[in-house]
Amino acid sequence: MASRMLEEESGRRGYESELVTNSSELLIPTTTGVGISAHKHYWKVRGEVDTLIIAAGAGARGPSDPALLAWLRKMARQTRRVCSVCTGAFLLANAGLLNGKRATTHWAHVESFARLHPGVSWDPNPIWVQDGNIYTSAGGSAGMDLALALIEEDYGSDLALAVARRMVIFLRRPGSQAQFSVALAAQAAERKGLQELQVWIAENLAKNLSVEVLAQRAAMSARNFARVFALELGNTPARYVEQARIEAARTQLASTEDSVEKIASRCGFSSAELLRRCFVRHFKIAPSQYRKHFRMPPATQGRGAASKGISYLGNASLGRVREDRRRGGSYP
């Protein structure tokens, strides 16, 4: 998608993608029953690879071929980025590429992966993590968030946002977004009125979000609203609002350079001190310490406009991307 949009705008392709596999056949079976055809076997890869992406699947969690692991270690030394989606991280861990690093994967596999690879700092919370030139992401949709982050890193936020719009992705999430989030919990409400109210809360965190205000917006009495809200979402309105504000503040601490005071005000906290107290209660760490540990590196406004070589490996498949480094400016 990014390559096509760049080509439409400037006549240059941003990425040259290639799907490679370690299976004996080029046709890669999937759990859906639909086969995917690889371009070639991984040992036939030649030339520069800019980004290597390991896809997910049962094959990534099974016994690993020593030759494949050796190839991954060699490629990791040669490529600018090595990435995994979901359980693809297990293959990176088997190759020793995650030792001493912070990484994530689908929350359902974190515990078992941690037992098998205790030398990796597995974090079940974020949707994707960068540690050096290694990027790991959580479940399938988190791979899309990671892909958008890579596009932003290469060509700037304008192209990443344009791709998100073209793909009708409602929200481009930073890596610090939790796998279990208030936004996800919002989908649990069965009443359309509550679903709409939750969207309104997320868009109006700085406003007065008292039970009385929310009840009036939901066209209920305060008592009935509090009862229905707790019944459908398993949380009181006040606690839900606090969690929504904390989650928004956490995202902004990791993805912006705004002051804690400005973030507190924007997220509906009356003061930076109140944000700090709530943050410590939820995460056992102060906002300033959280930012120090989880601040995402600023995106590069376009590294180079020539096509970037990307390879993909998942299940029994690998993928790579070549990057054309002739640069002509950021996406308009």
Image: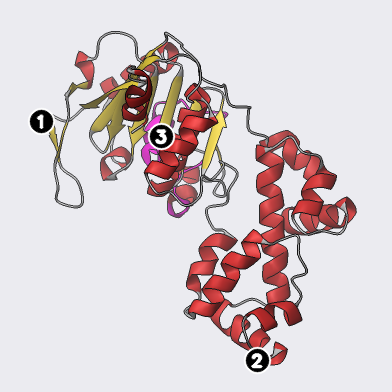
Residue, disc 2: 224
Q: CA distance from mark 2 to mark 3?
A: 47 Å
Q: Is residue 133 above or below residue 28?
A: above
> Picture quarter containing residue 79?
top left
> Picture quarter containing residue 26?
top left
Residue drawn 19% across and 52% down? 32
In the drawing, what numbered circle is on residue 84?
Answer: 3
Work out whether mark 2 precedes mark 3 in sequence or the reverse, and give the earlier one: 3
Q: Is residue 288 above or below residue 313?
A: below
Give the residue type at disc 3.
Ser
Q: In this rendering, would 32 be left or right of 47?
A: left
Which x, y percent locates residue 165? 43, 44
Give the residue type at disc 2.
Asn
Say how the picture is coloured.
secondary structure
Q: Is residue 285 above or below residue 51?
A: below
SS state under label 2? helix
Q: Is residue 181 above or below residue 24?
A: below
> Picture quarter containing residue 298?
top right
**In the image shown, does 105 or 19 lie closer to the viewer?**
19
Can I make out residue 103 in this image?
no
Can I make out residue 305 in this image?
yes
Q: What range is drawn magenta here?
A: 85-108
In the drawing, what numbered circle is on residue 25?
Answer: 1
Front disc: 2 or 1: 2
Which x, y percent locates residue 285? 78, 48
Determine crowd level at label 1: few under 14, some 14-19, many 20+ residues with C-alpha closer than 10 A.
Answer: few
**In the image shown, does 131 or 184 lie closer to the viewer?**
184
Work out whether mark 3 precedes mark 1 in sequence or the reverse, and give the earlier one: 1
Work out whether mark 2 precedes mark 1 in sequence or the reverse, and give the earlier one: 1
